[in-house]
Amino acid sequence: MQEILEKIRSFKQQLNAIILAHNYQPGEIQDMADFTGDSLGLSIKAAQTDAEVIVFCGVFFMAETAAILSPKKTVLLPEKHAGCPMADMITAEQLMDLKREHPDALVVCYVNSPAEVKAESDYCCTSANAVEVVKSLPVNKKIIFVPDKYLGGFVAEKTHRDIILWPGYCPTHVMITEDDIKKAKARYPNAIVMAHPECTKPVRILSDQILSTGQMLNFVKNSDIKQFIVATETDIIHALKKENPNAEFIAACPKAVCPNMKKITLEKILWAVENLAQGGSKYIITVPKETAIRAKKAIDRMINVLPSK
Ligand code: 13P
Ligand code: SF4
């Protein structure tokens, strides 16, 4: 492992590259990354970095978002088949049909969506700022929210807005059941339950805090409580433990593992930077210019709305 890390470091220097990793990445990848974060934090970092190459350890839509935000940089995804099934639950054509049905509605798309869907949207959002983004829209406007029906439902409850939902969902988060939370609470009665807004409504109702992964890290850092039940992808616990060695974290459902996030490995990161250093383009993610320009407008509007802490 040390040898692989050394080689990656040397290619990184040669290429002026930065490694960004999502909070659901395997522990060893979180540990070697230059920056870890939630979807919002990673988007902001991708937009602001001076590096010429961004190695994105996450899933396809995240690398695509980085490519849209930084068109002059080279974005690598070490495993091109690391997709997001929720993002693939809507196409631009389906969204265009929905817009025709509701011609006066504004469209808010979750960042977990294809670039072509972002290009058809007025606003993008992440789980960290979805409520703020919707709150910032004119009150007389109907809103189409795609593709996550659970995040959209949560936003509708928080904002009391008329929201047309698309029936998408995250297969990993729906593995976490109401029963899992009840059992965990019975076993750890003093623990705080933190759930991601991609969880189902019954799970949300039983939870104390509904937070993006980045917000979970902030919440725990600023809390005096020392025991947490975590209802999201399990590798966030690696980041939580690292920052809070004296607190205890219990996975609400140990099966809640995103198989796509785990497709990135140290070897694949090495192959990706090596390929680029040798003039290859195998791992480069690009977005057609026309699509990227339209999608960027929706993402820029999101970045200008402050996330809740
Ligand atoms: P956040 O890290 O933005 O909370 O997103 C979770 C997620 O499911 C990313 O795919
Ligand atoms: Fe997509 Fe769910 Fe995996 Fe996030 S955890 S990348 S929403 S499948």
Image (spheres, grey):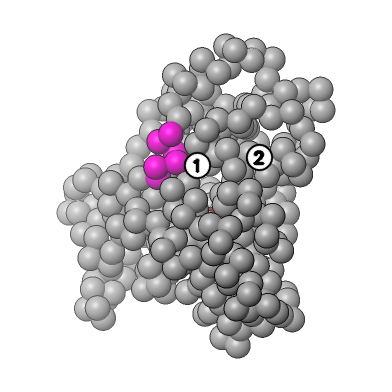
The answer to whether 292 is drawn above or below residue 24 in the figure is: above
Q: Is residue 187 left or right of residue 95?
A: right
Residue 88 lies in magenta, yes or no?
yes
Which quadrant is the N terminus positioned in?
bottom left
Q: Position of residue 127 (x, y in %)?
A: 61, 49
Mark 1: which amino acid?
A: Tyr
Q: Is residue 42 visible?
A: no
**Which residue is drawn at the image coordinates 57% and 70% (left, top)?**
183
Marks counted in the figure total 2
Q: What is the residue that sits farthest to the bottom in this orientation?
A: 246
Mark 2: which amino acid?
A: Gly
The answer to whether 192 is drawn above or below residue 289 in the figure is: below
Q: Position of residue 138 (x, y in %)?
A: 80, 27
Q: Is residue 283 left or right of residue 99?
A: left
1 or 2: tag closer to the N-terminus: 2
Q: Residues within 10 Å of mark 2 (few under 14, many from 20)?
A: some
Quarter where residue 297 is shown: top right
**Which residue is drawn at the image coordinates 35% and 53% (left, top)?**
260
For the residue pair 182 and 116, the one nearer the viewer reads as: 182
Extent of the magenta region: 84-89
Q: Position of residue 135 (x, y in %)?
A: 77, 38
- As measured in the structure, the alpha-carbon distance from the residue carrying label 1 to the one carrying label 2 is 11 Å
Q: Residues within 10 Å of mark 1 (few under 14, many from 20)?
A: many
Give SS at disc 2: helix
Quarter where residue 304 is shown: top right
Find disc 1 in the rendering and name its residue. 169
Is mark 1 in CB contact (under 8 Å) with mark 2? Answer: no
For the residue pair 215 and 232, the one nearer the viewer reads as: 232
Which quadrant is the C terminus positioned in?
bottom right
Q: Position of residue 154 (x, y in %)?
A: 68, 44
- Label 1 lies in ligand 2 vicinity (Cβ under 8 Å): no
Find disc 2 in the rendering and name its residue. 153
